[in-house]
Amino acid sequence: MLNELLLQMASEQEGMAAENKARWARLVTACLPFADAATTELPLGRLLRLSLFQVSVGMTTVLLTGTLNRVMIVELNVPAILVAAMVAVPLLFAPFRALIGFKSDTHRSHLGWRRGPYIWFGSLMQFGGLAIMPFALLISGGHGVGAVWIGHIAAMLAFLLVGAGVHTTQTAGLALANDLAPEHARPRVVALLYVMLLVGMLISGILMGLVLADFQEVKLVGVVQGAAVLAIVLNMVALWKQEAQDLTLTAFDKPRPAFKEAWAEFSAGGRASRLLVAVGLGAAAFSMQDILLEPYGGTILGLTVGQTTALTALWSAGTLAGLAYAARRLAKGGEPHRLAGHGMVWGILAVVAVICGGAFKLTPLFCFGVFLIGLGGGMFSVGTLTSAMSLARDGKSGIALGAWGAVQATAVGLAILVGGGLRDLVSSLAESGLLGTAMSAPATAYVVVYHLEIGLLFAALVAIGPLARYAPAGDKTPANSKFGLADLPA
């Protein structure tokens, strides 16, 4: 009797332990978006470690487009056109992502690795650019030893290296994730990776804002070079023992296909062209204020460096909300073109809130506008990406998504450059009195750029409208499918 009682108690304890484990698993799945992406081949621990390269990309993005542009314009007095050019240089490298992905697919090597070498060299370029960047910026702003023009050239080189490294690392890293994950889990795996990208931006924005709350040049050097070390450490931990050697894939005698004919086939036809026009206009509209929001908050609303850096974290939170809302809508059969159009409408309201927040000195309204920019941008990106995926039905997803990423990234880079140049031009005209007394306020140059953004958003709505009206049933996302932001470039 005693033995039976003890066995029964042991069995009950094992049952309780199994139930507790199940509860913890459900809790992790509920708290971590897309945690169900884990599979037997790619368990959650290994997947989270792989996602660290996205954290480093998010951290670098916050540094380039969130912190340094404010510091260069406000604290170092670098002309906004130069700042815009520096920030645009990494983005203009993004159109080569399709070529990078193709090269990693067909990489020849005696070591049997295709993705690893690209992640490694991308990490080295990212580290090198961040290592020299703070000193180049100080010289560029006249705060160092040396000619200012040397600082300008060195800063351009640093931004170019960082951009090339980020895009190379991210492209090869996403391709590696697709290689490791089974086919049915790939969309959810890539979705988890992009959630980690935004989480990295959110955390980095908060931490950098706290460190730079009391701005000093020494702190700037420490933050940028600390980010360089952390980036290469995160990337190497993410890559460690992830890719298996396969000499058959990297053999030198293996035929290498060309993608010229596939690209011509995809670009032919009015529907794809109209979509790419809408992507370019919308991406430009959502990005033109990237280097101006923080200087606008500092100049017009008197926000500190730490407070303006935190705006990037607020934008990231809005983007996460936009991704979550878009995923839910598409999972219920929502139409992607209409979803993108709704995102652009939210973008128009966001820019209006930013303008009114500065005009009436209402910081909460300004911050709400920043959040809405992220919300609308997330919905727009998801909608246009899903539409691009629907154009690739015969195994040509790389061409379709590569075209989407190339157009988006090029539009972003040009928009940032035009936004900075237009701000400088209007500011000089206002200061000289050529625009009249009514437009001599410091906010005039920023408001002109914001109104141009509103015009671009309306133009993008016009471009995508016929696609939403066309909306064949076959292009709708099935109600029982899981949306995963698969292969989201840029």
Image: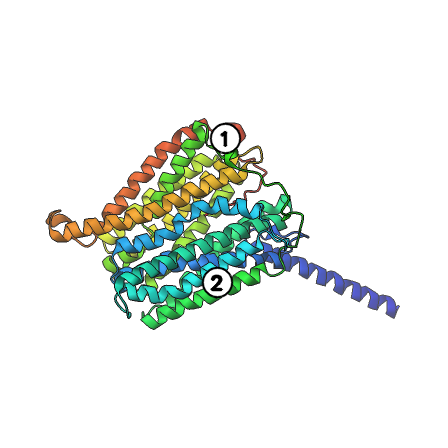
Residue type indicated by callout 1? Glu
Screen quadrant of the N terminus: bottom right
Relative to 241, say whether 451 is above or below.
above
488 displayed left or right of 374: right
Q: Which mark is residue 226?
A: none
Mark 2 or mark 1, earlier in chain: 2
Spot the residue most to the front.
Answer: 253
For label 2, the SS is: helix
Q: Position of residue 247 (x, y in %)?
A: 66, 51
Q: Which residue in the structure is indicated by mark 2?
A: 231
Residue 32 appears in the rendering = no
Position of residue 390 measured from the top left corner of the image (x, y, whole percent)? 52, 34
Q: Quadrant of residue 297?
A: bottom left
Question: Does the image show residue 427?
Answer: yes
Question: Residue at the spot x=15%, y=50% of the render?
Answer: 430
Q: Residue furthest right?
A: 1
Q: Which mark is residue 265?
A: 1
The alpha-carbon separation of the residues under discs 2 and 1 comes to 39 Å
Looking at the image, residue 250 lies above or below residue 219: above
- Work out whether residue 476 or residue 245 is closer to the camera in this orientation and state it: 245
Q: Residues within 10 Å of mark 2 (few under 14, many from 20)?
A: many
Q: Secondary structure at mark 1?
A: helix
For discs 2 and 1, the disc positioned in front in the rendered view: 1
